[in-house]
Amino acid sequence: MAADAETFTELPILPLSRALDPATKPQFLADLRSALLNVGFLYLSETGLPQELVQDVIRECKGFFENLPQEEKERIEMKNEKSFLGWSRLDNETTALNTDHREQLDLSTPHPVPGPEAPLYHNLLAPNQWPSSQHLPAFRPAYEDYMRRMSEISTLFTSLIAEAIGLPADAFSQFFDEHQQHKLKIVKYPEVDVPDLPAGASEIDRKKWEIKRQGVGPHKDSMLTSYLLQACNQPGLQAQNAKGQWIDCMPIDGTLVVAIGQGMEALTNGVCASTTHRVLSPRKSEGARYSIPFFQGVSYDAKFEAMDVPESVLKLRDEARKARKDDVEFTFVKGKWGHLGEATLMNRVKSHPDVGERWYPDLLRQIRAQQAAAAAA
């Protein structure tokens, strides 16, 4: 498929193994450059992840939601800590000002609690709140192994992105900490009881219907790259093309869905497209949807310094962006934040106001004042 920003109706599939073979790497990089410029979403196959490990993390994901007692989930609830790591109860997060109908657990690669002199956004670096090994003995070992392997895959893939757009393979290394934090969620989207959308429904009625099915609302991921393991056959993930059409990203065994983040778009002068996406909740009798997204991190102390992308690639960017339709707020606005960590912390407070109320009331007040001003305007 030729990845065209105006007309893409499916995602490209790129086998990572081809990037490791000198004979096939040039074509892989060409295909990757096309996907970065025109789509911002792709399937990554042949990743080298052990199938047994993938099965383990899927099994443990479902076990967490279906078998863990409620009091054990509450023991590791997100609002208990400043780090935004932990369990979020159903309907507790908001995206695009509407409630996300999902339950989730946020984890990260290990970090100690920051010292008292650290910037406020370093609160995002902290130990995990793990479910008890008494209830889920295989959970922590499986996810620590998976996050370690995904850290390696994401580092490799980011170096391939650099090469694909004419930069040295290590071009992004300056934006990583020595012990870089990466994050992961396990997510359950329960069924919702929503009737069929009537034929000929107005655009307003369609939007209301979509909000009722909002598993997670239209958004862009924050950092560099993210890698979604669709942990069941239930569809729901959709990416938005340049015409504003929503394209289904159906589960495909043996693949990860890669999304380019806003941080990557900002650092590459807009060459790498950060694509709006959402999840529609399954309807009654369809069965719950489970997913396991891994989010590649970037140093919270990094500043907004765009890379020196070759002029030839910038011209391709300008051509690809002509028809782009985009109404999602961009987090990394140049000049608005001093460090990536400041923007990230504000984003987290906006998404999890219960954590904001407990630990960051001043930031939450700022956000609500901005939202009120925007609504009035």
Image (tube, grey):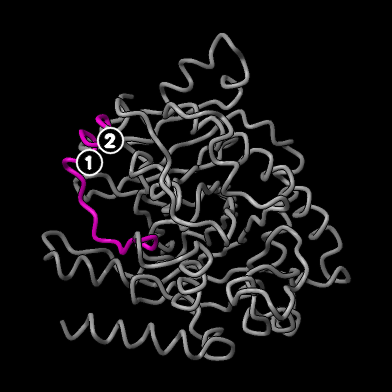
User: Image quadrant of residue 172?
Assistant: top right
| Closer-to-camera residue (164/116) | 116
Secondary structure of the magenta portion, mostly? loop
Residue at the spot x=53%, y=13% of the render? Answer: 24
* Quadrant in which the C terminus is drawn: bottom left
Residue 333 in which image quadrant: bottom left
The furthest residue to the top: 23
Residue 86's disc number: none
Q: Find disc 1 in the rendering and name its residue.
A: 321
Circles 1 and 2: CB atoms closer than 8 Å: yes
Identify the residue under disc 2.
Answer: 317
Tell me the kind of residue under disc 1: Arg
- Residue sitting nearer the eye, 102 or 17: 17
Tell me residue 209's x, y (percent): 26, 69
Relative horizontal placement of residue 367, taking residue 340 as reference (left or right): left
Segment tinted magenta in the rendering: 315-333
Q: Secondary structure at mark 1?
A: loop
Question: In this picture, is 351 found above or below 27?
Answer: below
Dot 2 falls on a residue whose secondary structure is helix
Amino acid carrying label 2: it is Arg
Q: CA distance from mark 1 to mark 2?
A: 6 Å
